[in-house]
Image (cartoon, coloured by chain):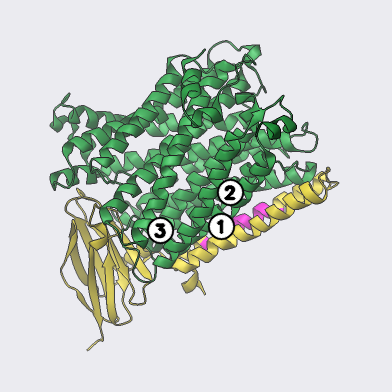
Chain colours: A yellow, B green
Amino acid sequence: MLDFLFSGWGAFWMTLFMLVPFAAIFFYVVHRKSVTDSGPSTTAGAKMSRLEGIWLTVVFVIFVGVNLGSLKYMPTMKAAHAATSNQQLHEIDFSATSWAYDISNRQIEAGSTVRFSGKSKDTMHGFAVYHPDGRMLFTMMLMPGLKNPTTLVHTFNEPGTYKVRCLEYCGIAHHAMQDELVVVKRS
Amino acid sequence: MSIASTIVQNTPIFGKMFSVDKSTGLEEINAWPALMIMASFVWLAIAGLLGFVMPVTQLFDMDTGLFYTTLTLHGAALAFPFSFQLMMGVGLHRSGGCVGKPVTGWLPALAFITMNVGAGLLTVAVLMGLKVSLMVMYPLPLVGAQMGIWSMNSVVLGFTGIYLVLACMILCYPILMLKMTFFGKKRPDLVLAERSLNDPGMLGMILSAMTLLVAGTPLVIVGTTVMAALYGIIPMSMAAWATEPVVFQYAFFIFAHNLMEAMALMVMSAMYATLPLYLADGTRKLFSNKLANLALWILLLTSVTSFLHHFITLYPNQPAGLSYWGNIMSWGTGIGAAISIFTVLATIWQHGLRAEPGIMAVLVGWVLYILDGASAMVTSNIAWSYQLHGTMWQSGHTMTVILSMSIMWMGVLYHHYPVLTGRKLDPMLGSWFVRLFVVGGLGAAISMLAGGAAGMPRRFAAWNQEGWMVYGNLTFFFGAILGASFLVYAYSLLKSREISSPLGQQVAAA
């Protein structure tokens, strides 16, 4: 459940979860108070205040709950965990130049935890890795002129060909800036 | 007669929509705003046409260069000379009527000139080959010139245009707003609806002006240094610090993020001022002014530093602590939004609503703004940001925030139009505008968010991969409905009739 929630489509449904009840209540209130009965309501002030308290509490609980739930899925947490444990990391360094990547190793064994470290040599670039089924796993922003590389830790469990795309607009051949990583079965 | 009135009067088609009513003695708060609003609609027409060309280039597999040209021009035209200028025009007219001060002199003229000349220069630079998207993507302009993709002249021209637009938004407009609010003598003959700073209908206007000025100052300093070097006023070595991508990017996003928040503060303020006028007999008040003000303050305080969410995927170059801060502050803006949701709905529930097209446009724009806020909060969460940043989700978010605020301003304009022009609008056409907008706006926004959820990259001239074309087609379809809603709005402006003229005469004249 949480695995789905903190995916791209999970984000989509979360957004609709916030919009749809609000939109439904909005259109109900507008319909009720402008079409059916546009006169003043008899709802007591105390009841409105109670509703206000309930509404803000619900919002607060949802906001805190979602953000606490997301901690496990933050790549920064995985990077911190990798740095403080003795987890074996497969290092892949890469650099980006308009409009290609120079990747130290394009082949990864399934089950490996990889630390990607990347830099840009000219302008802003991205390094987004897509699962063979087409969904995006993660993206990294590469800004030129920085001393340290942008890094991210990810574990590849399924064999296949993973597409790499630049997601930071970098000029007229931006869409052609693509590469591939191959995840092979562990020998 | 004011020079602004003369320009409006002599402009074909668009001038007819906004010619100023000179019989009321309010020309001093109407002329420059009318000119700005008229110019914003000219830019909307340009942006709308370009918005159609973008998906067409993808559907018919046309030159990718054309896609990136239209992408840059569409975004820039929509965000600044349309949306911001519309806000500036309606906002100045409102403020003038709230504080009883004229919108005259060199400052409004300078604001108008810098915005439109700047946007014009940027357009010429893009037509010369500069394709940098509305976010500039610094240092892409310089890298492109070094690679010979576009000329250095186009970079200098484009930067000059952007600099002038920024000067309007960061300096001219906020200074004008603050000057009108805090300085000069009040003219009772110009007061339409007096408001103090305790009134949420005025508070947001001032918070917005302050935000633009404060959050924009670092970018003005960086931009001025870069411009001085580009024009040879100072040696390039003296501007080296400002040309560092990390300096430029952070200065840019401190401003760009807060620009959107400032525009939100301003339009929320306008909504708080307009809504009571459409409650029951028009004499009612908001559910709670204190609660409305609290929402504005929370939005201001949380949004100022939430810009850090733009750089979450730069880790560890942006430390995780700053990213968490950006994450939490972005969700904090949701608390302000929740308060405003309660205030607005409780107000309508308590007093009843006269659902006229103007206020309905404001309210449906606000619904779209809430959708946008939800999408923004989601993508500001660190876990989701890694899967959404750089995708169509962001384009959907940007398009929706600009669109929702613009529609709210168009609704506010609907309310002020009779004072501005001495004419009134057809409510039937107004209702159709609102209906078409609800379908087109929500549909386009949700289609783009869905594309982002599916991993479809933004600013990307090859939609025909991984089945992403379906999201492009849906966006195009709903975009066409959205375009139709704008055409209906423009038609209603063209067909507006004199307030004193009975409907029968209008029909007979037609």
Q: Nearer the viewer, residue B117 or A12?
A: B117
Q: Is residue B143 left or right of residue A66?
A: left
The three-letter amino acid code for the residue at tag 1 is Phe
Chain letter for the residue marked with disc 1 in the picture: A
Q: Secondary structure at mark 3?
A: helix
Which structural element holds mark 2? helix
Is any atom of residue B447 visible in this view? yes
Q: Residue furthest bottom?
A: A187
Q: Residue at 33% of width from left, 52% of height from top?
A: B319
Res. B335 mark: 2
> Looking at the image, is A76 positioned above or below residue B280?
below
Report if the CB atoms under discs 2 and 1 are less than 8 Å apart: yes
Three-letter residue code for mark 3 = Met
Q: Residue at x 23, y 40 (%)?
A: B128
User: Height in image: B352 above or below B372?
Assistant: above
Type of amino acid at the residue the image marks with label 2? Ile
Q: Which residues are magenta?
A: A54-66
Q: Residue B400: say if magenta.
A: no
Residue B73 placement (x, y as % from top left) = 35, 43
Is residue B211 in sight in this rendering? no
Left or right placement of residue B162 versus residue B486 in this view: left
Give the residue at mark 3: B392
For the residue labelled by badge 1, is the local secondary structure a helix, a strand or a loop? helix
Task: Find the distance from the CA under tag 1 to the CA under tag 3.
Answer: 24 Å
Quadrant assignment for the C terminus of chain B? top right
Let me know if marks 2 and 1 both belong to one chain. Answer: no
Q: Is residue B146 above or below residue B396?
A: above
Query: On the image, numbered disc 1 is attached to which residue?
Result: A63
Q: Is residue A41 above or below residue A155?
A: above
What is the number of the mark on residue A97?
none
Which residue is at 56% across, 37% downward? B409
Residue B105, horizontal then vertical, whole percent? 46, 14
